[in-house]
Amino acid sequence: LHLLSRRQRQMCIRAANKLPDVDLLIRTSGEKRISNFMLYYLAYTEMFFIDTYWPDFTKDDLEKIIDDFYKRNRRFGSV
């Protein structure tokens, strides 16, 4: 078990705070879970689940998902 030093943890937190908010999460392979992946950064993220496995994911798949994303009404927690 490798434990991070206090300095290493602080560096990780600073690096994470510099990341922009996640707008769109694409989960391939038909899985309907996020497995704690960036859990605290996904509060207002639009999620798209696709049955295609990653090696088979194409530019056309990405374009369809982006088109769908732009059609969504993002409310960021409001009603």
Image (cartoon, rainbow, N blue to C red):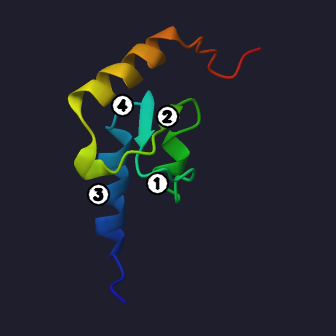
How many residues crowd around disc 4 within 10 Å: few (fewer than 14), some, or many (20 or more)? few
First-in-chain label (4 vs 2): 4
Judge from the rendering whether residue 76 lies leftward or rightward of residue 27; answer left or right.
right
State the residue position of label 1: 37
Q: Nearer the viewer, residue 1 or 73?
A: 73
Q: Nearer the viewer, residue 47 or 13?
A: 47
Helix, strand or loop under label 3: helix
Vertical arrangement, residue 38 with respect to residue 48, above or below: below
How many residues crowd around disc 1 within 10 Å: few (fewer than 14), some, or many (20 or more)? few
State the residue position of label 3: 11
Q: Which quadrant of the figure has residue 22?
A: top left
Q: Residue furthest right?
A: 79
Foreground disc of the pair 1, 4: 1
Foreground disc of the pair 3, 4: 4
Determine the CA span between mark 4 and mark 2: 19 Å
Split into 4 quadrants, where in the image is the C terminus?
top right
Give the image location of residue 41, x and y in percent: 49, 41
Tag 1: residue type?
Phe
First-in-chain label (3 vs 4): 3
Split into 4 quadrants, where in the image is the N terminus?
bottom left
Determine the CA span between mark 1 and mark 4: 15 Å
Tag 4: residue type?
Pro
Give the image location of residue 75, x and y in percent: 64, 15
Determine the CA span between mark 3 and mark 1: 19 Å
Judge from the rendering whether residue 42 lies leftward or rightward of residue 16; answer left or right.
right
State the residue position of label 2: 48
State the residue position of label 4: 20
Task: Identify the residue at horizontal 72%, vertical 16% (top origin).
Answer: 78
